[in-house]
Amino acid sequence: MSEWVALAIAMSAACLMVVAVVVLRTRRVAEDDDPSETPDVIEYMTMMIGVVYAIVLGLAIAGVWEARSAAQDDTLREAQALYEVSARAQVFPADFRDQVRADVDAYVSYVVDTEWSYMEENGSISPRGTELLDKLRADVSQRTPQNDLEAQAYQPMVDRIATADEARNARGQSTGPTMPGVVWFGLIVGAVVTVGMVFALQIRRSARELVLAGVFSALIAFLLFLIWDFDNPFGRGISVTTQPFLDLFPGATGGN
């Protein structure tokens, strides 16, 4: 099932649940019941709970969005560092240059074709990817520069490999859900309480009140879905992709 279909079902279910509760509740209300007699303190509590929950939702959305943005930046930094290694190998002899570029292409191809799926399934980066990056590091480190031009390019290559390794480790730490379970508990309980307080205001079956109650509950369902989707930067519908690698290495696919 598509995540967007699941979202539509969740929002529709939230609307229908609220409308059904309101309809069933009004059927059991006495004829002399006056909703205008709702105590002012309930209205004040409803307002305060809504404000506090809105702040919590905003902080949660900002947190997961920041985590996703950081994961995207790490991916771009890793791809750019590897591209610089491949480009700076130009000044070296053909045998060493071809070896370095083959190592880079092998690593990038593995990341694009295999490791992205591995991260989604296992919640971590793969040992094979680490081995391929270590091989690139070893091949570069074992060569001694033969002239000034090679010496000028050598140290930046080593530094770029270290940057790629750092970005890779950061990518591994961003794999999997980033929101603690206790926060999800608070978000779900807060949603139930916030929607539940709507009924404390004794809303009736007028079209205006039913529409507002349904839209309000659907909005909360949408925001919770949005947080859930952003919570895993590499494994959900709006996830970080391998596009930075594909942009810089359009031909480095299809290998492991």
Image: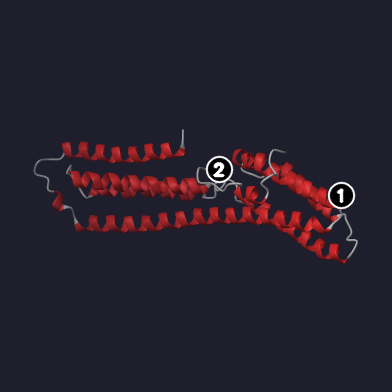
Q: Is residue 85 above or below residue 211?
A: below
The amino acid at mark 2 is: Gly
At horizontal 66% and vertical 39% (from top left) the residue drawn is 114
Could you give the CA–CA distance between mark 2 and mark 1, rounded to whole angstroms?
39 Å
Q: Amino acid at mark 1?
A: Asp
141 left or right of 82 in image: right
> Which of the two residues, 232 or 77, is positioned nearer the viewer here?
77
Residue that carries the numbered disc 1 in the rendered image: 95
Is 54 drawn above or below residue 10 in the view shown? below
The label shown at residue 8 is none
Question: In the depicted view, which residue is nearer to us: 51 or 209?
Answer: 209
Q: Position of residue 187 (x, y in %)?
A: 42, 49
Residue 203 visible in rendering: no
> Looking at this rendering, what residue extends furthest in the left direction?
32
- The quarter of the rendered structure image containing the C terminus is top right
Query: Which residue is tagged 2?
Result: 235
